[in-house]
Amino acid sequence: MQVRVTVGGGRLTGVVVVRTPSENERDREIAGYAVPVLTSETLTAQSAQIDTVSGATYTSEGYVRSLQGALDRAHG
Amino acid sequence: MGDRAGAGGLPWRHAEPVMGTVVSFVLRHRPTPVLRAALADAVALLHEADRVYSPFLPDSAVSRLRRGEPGRADAPSEVRRVLELCERAHSRTRGAFDAWADGRPDPCGLVKGWAAERAWRVLREAGATDVCVNAGGDVRVGGAPGPAGVWRTGIADPRRPGRLLAVVAGRDHAVATSGTAERGAHIVDPRTPAPATGLLAATVTGPELLWADVYATAAMVLGAAEAHRWIVSKPGYALLAVAADGEARQSRAGAESSHPQAWMIADAIPIASPSDKHPQWPGTP
């Protein structure tokens, strides 16, 4: 996969996929570790397909209103 | 719709309140007796880590150590091992991670990631190859969430609660985030010592949750510029830092870096995965 990085005002504003990878073993292997990819639009819970959420450590009370809490409840 | 209503009740989820937070498990396996026992072991391991290492419980091994009873040499071997990891964390982070910041041992900045990594390994060794453990926002994944997909971890936007800043996708890796969004400026720069306020959040990805977690905490202390220079000396680890002014920057191990491997890894991430292979967010049509 190739990405095009957009820079505006000295900051990274977007990453666009130019070419997607083939589903071969090497791609799978090097996809084993990952780095974050900033997207050009705001990702909302509704538009992003995610399995889990990483963020600042929540308390057990904070969990209830966290995205991860909502995800766990939704999948019960 | 994919896994959510998949055959056999896959995936199988559990959320456990422990260590002052909640640890969420996703297993893409049938809940066999063997895996149920492994999950119980993983959960027990987390509670045991809480009992032994919490500085908030007066009878924990760490609380006794902090009172000087007994001395470190007499502490249980596992406690000594964790303190050794804390020393390694101190040297690997240029002193930004310091379990002795107040002069007494407090490994709790390292224990959650260490314990979650071990819990993940307990499940994996029991045969749960496709599993995700999320310890209060610090994530360890293995295998895949579906037959053809990769795990996708949303990174919470520290400025806009309920929204995501980025998505990390991959198979076997860890994602840890430190930040001020949930509990304020609670990370202290052990070198000053004042609260670290240069960054709103720091997310580190890499092969092990123990180190991703330590490095994310250290990045908060180091600040964006120094943290980005420092992280390239950690093979396999990458940083996404959100500065106090909202600027988000991710490490790009490219021409300027001695570790071009990380650049290749970034290039290999599928941003858009097959939609029907992943659990969907509530409200998604």
Image (cartoon, rainbow, N blue to C red):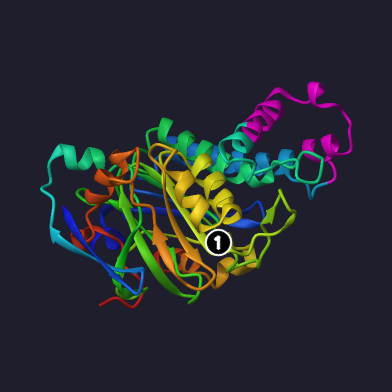
Percent x, y for residue B269?
A: 25, 52
Task: Tell me the quarter of the picture where residue B41 sits.
Answer: top right
Q: Is residue B37 visible?
A: no
Q: Front-most of B38 and B88?
A: B88
The reply, left or right, for residue B139 in relation to residue B111 is left
Q: Is residue B197 magenta?
A: no
- Main SS, magenta residues: helix
State which region is magenta. Answer: B58-87
Q: How many marks?
A: 1
Residue with the mark numbered 1: A56
**Mark 1: amino acid:** Ala
Percent x, y for residue B259?
A: 33, 38
Task: Tell me the quarter of the picture where residue B53 sits.
Answer: top right
Q: Is residue B78 magenta?
A: yes
Residue ID at (66%, 32%): B87
Residue ID at (66%, 51%): B19
Which chain hosts label 1?
A
The quarter of the picture where the C terminus of chain B appears is bottom left
Query: Callout 1: few (<14), some (14-19), or many (20+) C-alpha neighbours within 10 Å?
Result: many
Q: Is residue B122 above or below residue A74?
A: above
Percent x, y for residue B154?
A: 39, 62
Percent x, y for residue B17?
A: 61, 56
Q: Front-most of A35 and B56?
A: A35
